[in-house]
Image: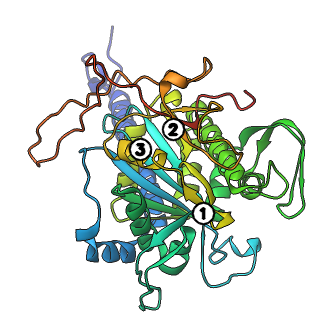
Amino acid sequence: MRTPPGRPEGPGLGASPTGAGRLRRRRRWLRCTAIGVAVVVLGAVGAGWVAYEILNANITSDDDAAAELARFEKERPTSLVRDAQNILLIGSDSRSGEGNKKYGKDPGTERSDTMILLHLAANRHSATAVSIPRDLMVDVPSCRRPDGTRTQPMFAMVNYAFEIGGSACTIRTVEKLTNIRVDHHMVVDFRGFTDMVDAVDGVEVCLKEPIDDKEAKLKLPAGKVVLDGEQALGYVRARKSIGDGSDTDRMDRQQRFLAALVNEVRGNDVLLNPAKLYPVLDAATSALTADPGLASLRGLYDLVRGMRNIPTERVQFLTVPRTSYVNNPNRDQLVEPDATQLFERLRADLPVAVSKDLPEDSAAKSGNSTSSRTADSAPDSAPDPSPDPSYDHEEESRDDGKSKAKQPRGSAGTPEPAPTFRGNTAAGDACG
């Protein structure tokens, strides 16, 4: 066969201008594709970095509180168990700032509507959230006011500490009350709460009776209801129209709601879905003030990472044992020795158990008090109060001089049963 004029002999693409052109086009296409992939990858990384920077910048670091606490370091409790964490969660009723003015006139101060001491076990196999009543009468130390002046020590309601001296004063007051070292703290305002509930597309609760509260702007039917952010805020803050109108009843409601929120976050693939997780993180961080150790996504990530595998039945909610204050029925005081027992066990990182009901012979004889009891008196419906078998509280020396607390043992050498307090877990059914 003759070779056509102008076409060199020899097989292959390289043997013709047409084949060489196709090769050059293919190479250009591969280069463009590679560049395109690189741009997409870098764009994704860049978007992730931008998102990280936005979320990281959302968090307000409570540097003033850190400086104030450093001045009183010598009088603060020491930590007994390494890796155990105690975090004070403070709900602020501040009307200042974007999104908060609609809840009322800004009085120039803020109070702590909600105060919860969250204890995370060193092995991260359990979490215990203890509500502290805002009307609890306590010793408030001398604290620094926002204007730089100092208050005199006083005996007052615990939420007064936040009003006069912010988070630092609150932490010192709680530490004085419990003898538990507060490792971290967070302050969340109204807007942060509502935005976070909306970010998870609402939280389901169960109402025994319909609610019609004009002051809380809340009108809901009985049964299972999914609350949006504004409804949820009214639900956890309402007092006069729900239950017996007591602060104890409101704290129980707050605990049940938090349990439902935990289930919503864990059961809706929020933590595994970036599209769902980002709005939650954006809402949470936008209205969050935290100590420097938590005031970053890295700090929050380390905290959440340690909690993600805790079984819901080991996420417990209870109220510090309290009863009406002897000199004023509208105030609270601790029930002893129950409260001290609770604080000592949390400080030593020893397990406690919770139950919805307490026996008739317990100290909780009125609707406004809570108390503890031993596991021997637990009803059949109570959760197993025996210590978590994953706990290892045998004495163990540490390089830093700290040691794990020793699990109390009975006469037979077996671990003593954990005391039980009135409360609930995140595993409970909303309508159970």
Above or below, 257 relative to 30: below
The C terminus: image quadrant? top right
Q: Which residue is mark 3?
A: 341
- N-term mark: 3 or 2: 2
Q: Residue at x 46, y 70 (%)?
A: 139
Q: Is residue 43 left or right of residue 234?
A: left
Q: Residue at x 59, y 36 (%)?
A: 362
Per the image, label 3 sits on a secondary structure element best described as helix
Q: Which residue is mark 2?
A: 271
Above or below, 245 relative to 58: above
The N terminus: image quadrant? top left
Above or below, 61 relative to 251: below
Q: Nearer the viewer, residue 47 or 53?
A: 53
Looking at numbered disc 2 in the image, what kind of residue is underneath it? Answer: Leu
Looking at numbered disc 3 in the image, what kind of residue is underneath it? Answer: Gln
Mark 3–mark 1 distance (CA, rounded to whole Å): 21 Å
Residue 134 is marked as 1
Q: Nearer the viewer, mark 3 or mark 1?
A: 3
| Residue 45 x, y percent position in the rendering | 39, 49
- N-term mark: 3 or 1: 1
Where, by quadrant of the figure, is residue 257 drawn? Answer: top right
Q: Characterize the local packing of mark 3: few (<14), some (14-19) or many (20 or more) Cα atoms within 10 angstroms.
A: some
Q: Is residue 1 left or right of residue 240?
A: left
Answer yes or no: do the residues labelled 3 and 1 have beta carbons within 8 Å? no
Q: Nearer the viewer, residue 123 or 278?
A: 123
Q: Nearer the viewer, residue 376 or 387?
A: 376
Q: Characterize the local packing of mark 1: few (<14), some (14-19) or many (20 or more) Cα atoms within 10 angstroms.
A: many
| Residue 113 x, y percent position in the rendering | 63, 64
Q: Is residue 2 left or right of residue 138?
A: left
Mark 2–mark 1 distance (CA, rounded to whole Å): 32 Å
Visible in this render: residue 406?
Answer: yes
Above or below, 121 relative to 312: below
